[in-house]
């Protein structure tokens, strides 16, 4: 089991930046993949970015060049650096990690004003 807690969301103007954090309750030792998803009102949850052990990061086309996913194993924390934010990035952002199970955080709201 892994408990995940997101933070860092908020209200920002278009063109601004935010960094989301996802703190895990234990080490990443057995984690095989981790990622960020988002869900806008009336839309399905979608993958934003993900990393798997030993593999390159994967990004949704809509965020390539603007968002960067990273991890700090010592801090047991995953990050999503978001730059040049657009109103269409407005959503609740969730972190997810997988080992033998799939674990989700509670979500953090990101609102980008035009």
Image: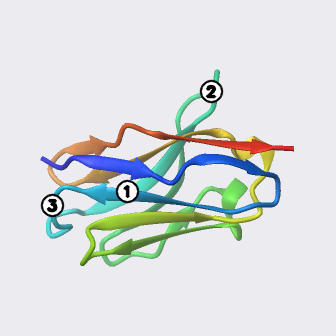
Coloration mode: rainbow
Location of residue 50 with respect to 70 vertically, above or below:
above
5 or 27, nearer to the observer? 5
Location of residue 104 with respect to 12 vertically, above or below:
above
Location of residue 74 with respect to 85 vertically, above or below:
below
The residue drawn where x is 53% and y is 35% is: 45
Within 10 angstroms of label 3, few (less than 14), some, or many (20 or more) residues? Answer: some
**Lower sequence index among marks 2 and 3:** 3
Between marks 2 and 3, how big is the CA–CA gap?
32 Å
Q: Quadrant of residue 114?
A: top right
**Residue 62 shows which numbered tag?**
none
Q: Residue furthest right?
A: 114
The residue drawn where x is 12% and y is 47% is: 1
Single out the mark in the foreground, 2 or 3: 3
Q: Position of residue 43 (x, y in %)?
A: 62, 27
The secondary element bearing badge 1 is classed as strand
Q: Position of residue 109 (x, y in %)?
A: 56, 39
Q: Position of residue 70 (x, y in %)?
A: 45, 72
Within 10 angstroms of label 1, few (less than 14), some, or many (20 or more) residues? Answer: many
Between marks 1 and 3, how big is the CA–CA gap?
12 Å
The secondary element bearing badge 3 is classed as loop
Between marks 1 and 2, how big is the CA–CA gap?
23 Å
Left or right position of 104 against 67? left
**Residue 43 shows which numbered tag?**
2
Within 10 angstroms of label 2, few (less than 14), some, or many (20 or more) residues? Answer: few
Left or right position of 15 against 39? right
Tags 2 and 3 touching, CB below 8 Å = no
| Residue to which mark 3 is pinned | 26
**Residue 22 shows which numbered tag?**
1
């Amino acid at each position: 089991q892994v408990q995940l807690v997101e933070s860092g969301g908020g209200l920002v103007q278009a063109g601004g930046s935010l960094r989301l954090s996802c703190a895990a309750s234990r080490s990443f030792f057995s984690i095989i993949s981790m990622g960020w998803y988002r869900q806008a009102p009336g839309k399905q949850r979608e993958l934003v970015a993900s990393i798997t052990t030993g593999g390159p990061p994967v990004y949704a086309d809509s965020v390539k060049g603007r968002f960067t996913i990273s991890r700090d194993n010592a801090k047991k924390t995953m990050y999503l650096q978001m730059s040049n934010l657009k109103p269409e990035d407005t959503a609740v952002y969730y972190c997810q990690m997988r080992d033998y199970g799939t674990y989700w955080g509670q979500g953090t709201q990101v609102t980008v004003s035009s």
